[in-house]
Image: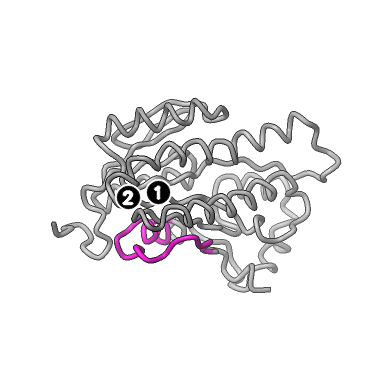
Amino acid sequence: MPDAKNPWLGLDGARIVVAGGSGTIGAALVSGFETAGATVGNIDLNPQHGAVRVTADLTTAQAGRDAIAQAREELGGLDVFVHAVGINDRRPIEAYDDADWERFIAINLTSAFATAQAALPQMREQGHGRIVFFSSVAGRSGHKLHGPYAATKGAINQLMRVMAHEHAQDGVTVNAVAPGYMDTELTRDYLDANPDKRAALVDLIPARRFGQLEEVVGPVLFLASRQASFITGQVLYIDGGRTVV
């Protein structure tokens, strides 16, 4: 059936779940998918956007699986799942304790594993589906003060590749986007507290600026679309050239 809103993407009528759809990027994703004609479910601690809103604390695996089941039931199915849940806390390795490490693993990694695992069965059975994880340039590069964060994002990259390999024959694609420095609320808060860091961060980016929200939303919608049916197991860096150097 033609997509009157955007025939190229083919997302009109798609049933989409965004985990973390109330953050700055997550909310932009929900809006972007809705503009493309999709029906969107938002899983978050305080979901404020989306046609279906599921309140959940994704720090436990079972909570993640239950949230996906609820969103899928209320949407009447599931075609696309985007995991956009994550935290960061910039400190030297020695400054993190066991509780810090476990919190990073629970929020950034366990939530990704459990929710994506729960999203897979219907996608496999219906013979099509899209899963997109949010990684980071820190999952590739050894940035200082990003120890647990970088470890979880590197793990997500590998989880994504294995899932992509296992389910390519089922018509399910699994990819990741890896933003660099973006103009988000978290970045602004960090720079407000550390104004001397702005010039140094911009100097790391060949494009000489931070990325904008729409520059993340577009690539995610593409990977979720019918146009990306032969792309799987890939990390798409959205970084203004940060990982080129």
Asked if labels 1 and 2 touch by Cβ distance under 8 angstroms, the answer is: yes
Q: Quadrant of residue 27?
A: top left
Q: Quadrant of residue 208?
A: bottom right
Residue 155 covered by magenta stretch: no
Q: Amino acid at mark 2?
A: Phe
Question: Where 162 sits versus 7, above or below?
Answer: above
Look at mark 1 in the image and give the residue it sits on.
29
Q: Which contiguous range is marked in magenta?
A: 217-236
In the orientation shown, which residue stands out farthest toward the left? 1
Question: Where 233 sits versus 79, above or below?
Answer: below
Q: Quadrant of residue 207?
A: bottom right
What is the crowding at mark 1: few (fewer than 14 residues within 10 Å), some, or many (at least 20)?
A: many
> Residue at point 75% right, 47% down?
147
Gap in angstroms between the C-alphas marked 2 and 1 = 6 Å
Q: Amino acid at mark 1?
A: Leu
- Left of 218 or right of it: where is 210? right
> Residue at point 82% right, 44% down?
93
Q: Position of residue 91 (x, y in %)?
A: 78, 44
Quadrant location, the C terminus: bottom right
Which one is in front, 16 or 232? 232
Q: Secondary structure at mark 2?
A: helix
Look at mark 2 in the image and give the residue it sits on.
33
> Residue at point 51% right, 57% down?
177
